[in-house]
Amino acid sequence: MTSNFNVNEFLSGLCGLWNIGNTCFMNSMIQCLSHTRELTSFLRGQSSSESGTSKDHLILAEYTKLIKNMWSGTQRSINPSDLKYAFSSKHRMYSGSAQQDAQEFLRFFLDSLHGALNVAIKRDPLSEIDDNMNNKDKADMLWEWYSKAENSMIKDLFVGQLRSTLKCTFCNMESTMFDPFWDLR
């Protein structure tokens, strides 16, 4: 019986990250993001050259290189110092070796990836919202308005819409709004 088992395919993604100082906060988030199939598949299909000159584009380029190396199946562990350097060039508080909050890092990191991948056009100011509009139409209108200026794969994968309702205890009138959120706290 012959097997079509490819050991490199099995080992893809099974790659550790060196702890360079106190970078476990970064490494744990990179490992989680690395296993977000849609994002990793997209990045592995990208060319290695930078498509822009901003710090966000540099972060994206270094992350793309790191993902390609992590998923090559040829390395057991990788030094993420180029990504850390690119990230800390934008976010100075990450330049040292101090321990940082993982969720805060993730939020800044996703924001940088979104900034580099955002293909949106400038949106018009939001017009007055009618509180009598039905909630589904209001949610759709606000999401469409938000998406005109914030349009990337990162938004598609990680941004949601939060519904909040205020109710007057005196007259029982309700006002409902829908706002984007990037993370749950």
Image: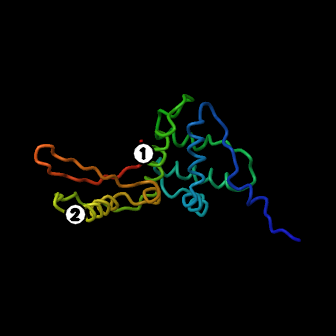
The label on residue 184 is 1
The label on residue 134 is 2
Q: Residue at x 47, y 49 (%)?
A: 110
Q: Could you say where residue 26 lies in the image, as x and y percent from the top left? A: 56, 40
Out of 142 and 170, give the one closest to the viewer: 170
**What residue occupies the far right of the structure in this picture?**
1
Mark 1 burial class by Cα count in 10 Å: few <14, some 14-19, many 20+: few
Q: Residue at x 52, y 49 (%)?
A: 58
Mark 2 burial class by Cα count in 10 Å: few <14, some 14-19, many 20+: few
The label on residue 116 is none
Out of 150 and 51, give the one closest to the viewer: 150
Q: Residue at x 19, y 63 (%)?
A: 133
Q: Could you say where residue 45 lies in the image, as x and y percent from the top left? A: 60, 64
Where disc 2 sits, the SS reads loop
Tell me the amino acid under the disc marked 2: Asn
In the rendered image, the quadrant that contains the C terminus is top left
Q: Nearer the viewer, mark 1 or mark 2?
A: 2
Q: Residue at x 56, y 37 (%)?
A: 25
